[in-house]
Image (spheres, helix red, strand yellow):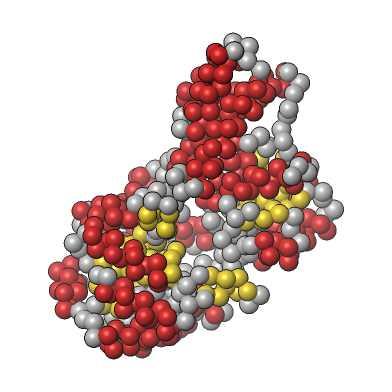
Amino acid sequence: MRPEELRDRLEERVLLLDGGMGSLLMSAGLERGRAPEFWNLEHPERVEAAHRGYVEAGSDIVHANTFGASPPKLKAAGLEGRCREVNAVAVAIARRACGAAALVAGDLGPTGLLLPPVGQATVEEMAGAFREQASALAEAGADLLSIETMYDLREALIAAEAARATGLPVLASMTFESRKRGFFTIMGDPLGASLAALADAGADAVGCNCSVTSSVMVGMVSEARRSVSVPIAAQPNAGQPRVTPQGTAYDASPEAFARDVVAIVEAGARLVGGCCGTTPAFIACARAGLGTAGVR
Amino acid sequence: MTEASEVLAALTRAVLEGDDQSVVGLARRALDGGLAPLEMIEQGLVPGIRRAGELWEEGEYFLPELVSSAQAMKAAMDVVRPALARHGGGGELGRVVIGTVHGDIHDIGKTLVGTLLAANGFAVSDEGVDVPLERFVDRARELDADLVCASALLTTTMAEQRELVGALRRAGLRARVMVGGAPASREWAREIGADGYADNAVAAVAVARRLVTGEA
């Protein structure tokens, strides 16, 4: 897909993204401590079923299960040297689930490498990692690339440059927390300036995901709207995580999430979905909520 | 007197600003000038790292500032510690083994806690991420550790923290255990029999100090 096509679709209407993947796979039996990317190779039918849940719930764009499929992350997970293979398989699985009903986004998460002063990684090794994953996703036939959960603007910009080089549309999201003086990443990158920098770097849409509840996300989108003119994406968590003997539980209901999704769109988002803890039920509720609100 | 207090204030400022080059120079000159090493640590360096921690908790400092301050503190401590040993004073506050549990490769929080513990005078052995239980136990035994710190960022890996407590106890080691990471909590620490929990790196230093020295 060409970047202009995505922008045209976003002018027509709000596009619904999918929700969480790791939490869904865990409830399908993903072993503790295991990287979700293993299941692309070992249980493709279970990954496909998770995607299908989102397509049936009304997602227009589904993320392939490649959030941790950059070479450094794969190496840490025990899948060293298999970047091309893992990304290709993951895109094929998502494509089978989506058919013509939804677009497949190649998902690029943080490499786990840390630049100085916090870590000792170099810009070159980070850029190499993103180039390898982005080109693998493009070759596998992803419709667009979605960079997510970035906490260091420098890494987000490196990822955006690698993603742009494929010629596919690029969605770039970072993860911010509410701090004393506004919304910042853990590295201290402020929301407005960071998203503006990503838009300047050529991202076709920019946004915020993870870390916060849907109600906090409404305020983040308002600030993003004041800072950039490109389309804005928002993927909040399903409320706050709580640890229970059965595992992590999130305290928001799909209905409450859907009410906030309408507010998020009214605040200016053109792409909206969920992050940790959200399931197809959340996305189905969001779809119904947007329909009832008559939002386009 | 004025001169000493100015040097101490400059040390505090250099740590707070994360200026590891000038803090090392200042520390060397202060030692050459006859300033007592313990006084330098307690009245110069420690107030700097404590203030950096406070600013982080208040939302004024972010990870890069906090890490830079910790690194400046550590660089200064490397200069001062040998002099301190010659004065027959202080030594290390305690020996710590720290790591992220098996199956978990989250590095930031664990490294930050390790760096801050080292900056505050603990001898820290950072075992990295994805650390098997046996490695925690072996290192705690080798170093006769006072404290073992285990980080888990995933609800799927936090169960390793419980197993670690059991493994250290079965090995008959005296080390206390502190746990941390996003899914952990005070209740969780109590449930698994850990000795301490901290929800951020600055708090972790205070908990470690309490666990190792018995001070409140």
- Is residue A85 something that shows in the picture? no
In this rendering, is residue A198 above or below B81?
Answer: below
Locate residue A284 relative to residue A269 in the image: left or right. right
- Is residue B168 something that shows in the picture? yes
Residue at 54 percent across and 80 percent down: it is A27
Residue at 37 percent across and 86 percent down: it is A284
The residue nearer to you, when weighing A76 against B104, is B104
In this rendering, is residue B110 above or below B44?
Answer: below
The residue nearer to you, when weighing B19 against A181, is A181
Farthest-out residue, top: B33
Farthest-out residue, right: B172
Residue at 49 percent across and 47 percent down: it is B58
Q: Position of residue A225 (x, y in %)?
A: 24, 63
The residue nearer to you, when weighing A52 against B10, is B10
Q: Position of residue A293 (x, y in %)?
A: 27, 85
Q: Position of residue B188 (x, y in %)?
A: 68, 65
Residue at 37 percent across and 67 percent down: it is A217
Looking at the rendered structure, the number of numbered marks drawn on it comes to: 0
Picture quadrant of residue B180: bottom right
The quadrant in which the N terminus of chain A is found is bottom left
The quadrant in which the C terminus of chain A is found is bottom left
Picture quadrant of residue A137: bottom left
Picture quadrant of residue B32: top right
The residue nearer to you, when weighing A85 against A129, is A129
Q: Position of residue A75 (x, y in %)?
A: 49, 57
